[in-house]
Amino acid sequence: MDSSLLTAQPGLPGFVKIVEVGPRDGLQNEATVLSTEVKIDFINQLSLAGFSTIEAASFVSPKWVPQMAASTDIMAGIRRHPGVIYSALTPNMKGFEAALEAGVNEVVIFGSASEAFSQKNINCSIAESIGRFRSVADAAKDNHLRLRGSISCSFGCPYQGEVSAQSVADVVKQLRDLGCDEIDIADTIGVGTPRHVQTVMTYAAREFSVDALSGHFHDTYGQALANIYASLEVGIHIFHSSVGGLGGCPYAKGATGNVATEDVLFLMQGLGIETGIDLHKVVDAGQFISRQIGRKAVSRAGNALAARGTV
């Protein structure tokens, strides 16, 4: 069937925003360290594909995240397209100042819905971690930059196990009070299932506009597309994905990480939901970056379409 003849079914949005996180969240979890030139080429391909938001860099210590060491050079080297938001992770004021100088359009701060995860990873409570971002949030607003907040372990934690929907809602409220324009509900270890996802998103929407909540799903247990569909049913229409399925899950050895952008786009195409993104160009970008890191793309739709040589 010609997907162009389809319209979104009642109850689902007619348009979905896809945030491409491959250049940052995807590549930083890959073992192969790529050259700055390859990363710039990759981001340029994504810009041409029609994404409105690309998570392009992370201004963190290269000691901890070697893949992100050249973020300043990458931001200087990319060809920026009008209307595209190029975002970067900024964990502290030093990172924010570097991001500001590099000309990012959006800064990303993060917290966890799991106290155990927060203590294990950054040695402080959730409330303390959010408090540390207040100066970054204020600086972002003073400089007229978009501010996005991300909540890890929203559906489960590798250390404490279950995470309550109310815990997620509590962090949403704290990020809202910092002035976040958008808040990501992230399934860091990929354990969410559709009913659970709908419950968590419903709780989150009590504290923040559903129009500015996004779903960031990992495909560790093969539930990411089902969780995206479940999110659509409760009004979520912003999703994160990674071209070629870049990135792994550091808490599940050998498991896949971010849901593949090609698979998400293929789903949206089948549902008659517009994204404004050229699937053919995304497939090409996915195959390109997978060759660079020396492995086959994780995306099933991407690999199938590439093998057919057509979208």
Image (cartoon, rainbow, N blue to C red):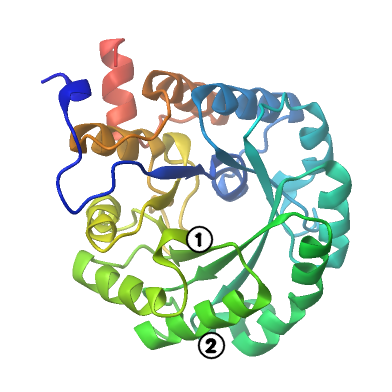
Q: What residue type is labelled 2?
A: Glu
**Element type at mark 1:** loop
Question: Does the rendering let one see residue 141?
Answer: yes
Q: Position of residue 304 (x, y in %)?
A: 26, 23
Distance in Å between CA atoms under marks 1 and 2: 18 Å
On the rendered structure, is 89 left or right of 301?
Answer: right
Q: Nearer the viewer, residue 82 or 299?
A: 82
Q: Which amino acid does label 1 sit on?
A: Pro
In which quadrant will I find the C terminus?
top left
Q: Which residue is the extreme one toward the left?
A: 1
Q: Where is residue 179 in the image (x, y as percent from the top left)?
A: 66, 71
Q: Nearer the viewer, residue 153 or 14?
A: 14
**Element type at mark 2:** helix
Q: Which residue is drawn at 20% across and 38% down?
A: 271
Give the residue pinned by disc 1: 250
Q: Residues within 10 Å of mark 2 (few under 14, many from 20)?
A: many
Residue 227, quarter of the rendered image: bottom left
On the rendered structure, is 193 left or right of 21?
Answer: left
- Mark 1 vs mark 2, foreground winner is 2
Q: Measured along the vertical axis of the image, is residue 200 above or below residue 189? A: below
Q: Position of residue 67 (x, y in %)?
A: 70, 45
Question: Does the rendering let one see residue 159?
Answer: no
